[in-house]
Every structure is written in structure tokens, then in C-alpha cells.
Amino acid sequence: MDETLTKILDLQKQWTAKNTEAMKTRGVLVRRTLADQLRQHVAGLASALGVPLPT
């Protein structure tokens, strides 16, 4: 997950409203890669935050 976040933040420096290759890559990392990684840890995250698991 650290590597994914590092890539996202590096690409954020190139942010533009245009659909450039960098923004397409960033979009995939945010919407798919990072989301999948967070889902793998949902129980631990919910417990650490003191919130119920999503249904």
C-alpha cells in the first residue's frame, strides 16, 4: 500500500483536468488498486477507527 500511495502522490504533482496518461494511471491507482488494498484490511481499519464493519 505504501508503494501505491507513493505513486499516487507523485502523479498528483502532475494533476490536470485533462485526461492525460498520468491522470489515467492515477485514476486506476485510486479507484482500483488502492481501493482493493483497503478492502483487504477493512476489518482491522474498522476496529482501529471504532466503527462498525460496512454491510
Image (tube, rainbow, N blue to C red):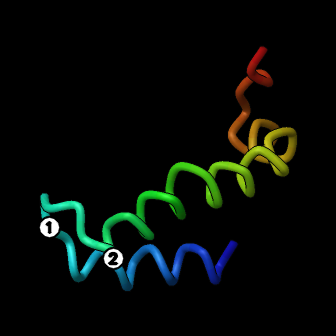
2 shown above or below 24: below
Viewer-proximal residue among 5 and 45: 5
Few, some or many C-alpha atoms within 10 Å of disc 2 (few <14, some 14-19, many ≥20)? some
For numbered disc 2, what is the local secondary structure? helix
13 sits left or right of 6 in the view: left
> What number is the disc on residue 22?
2
Question: Could you give the CA–CA distance between mark 1 and mark 2, rounded to whole angstroms?
Answer: 9 Å
Q: Are marks 1 and 2 in contact (CB under 8 Å)?
A: yes
46 shown above or below 41: above
Residue 5 screen position, x and y as percent? 54, 74
Few, some or many C-alpha atoms within 10 Å of disc 1 (few <14, some 14-19, many ≥20)? few
Amino acid type, mark 1: Thr
Residue at position x 85%, y 47% in the image: 44
Quadrant assignment for the C terminus = top right
Give the labeled residue for mark 1: 16
Q: Mark 1 or mark 2, which has the lower sequence index?
A: 1
Amino acid type, mark 2: Ala
Task: Locate residue 54: give its quadrant.
Answer: top right
Residue farthest to the top, as pictured: 55
1 sits left or right of 43 in the view: left
Task: Locate residue 11: give its quadrant.
Answer: bottom left
Residue at position x 72%, y 51% in the image: 36
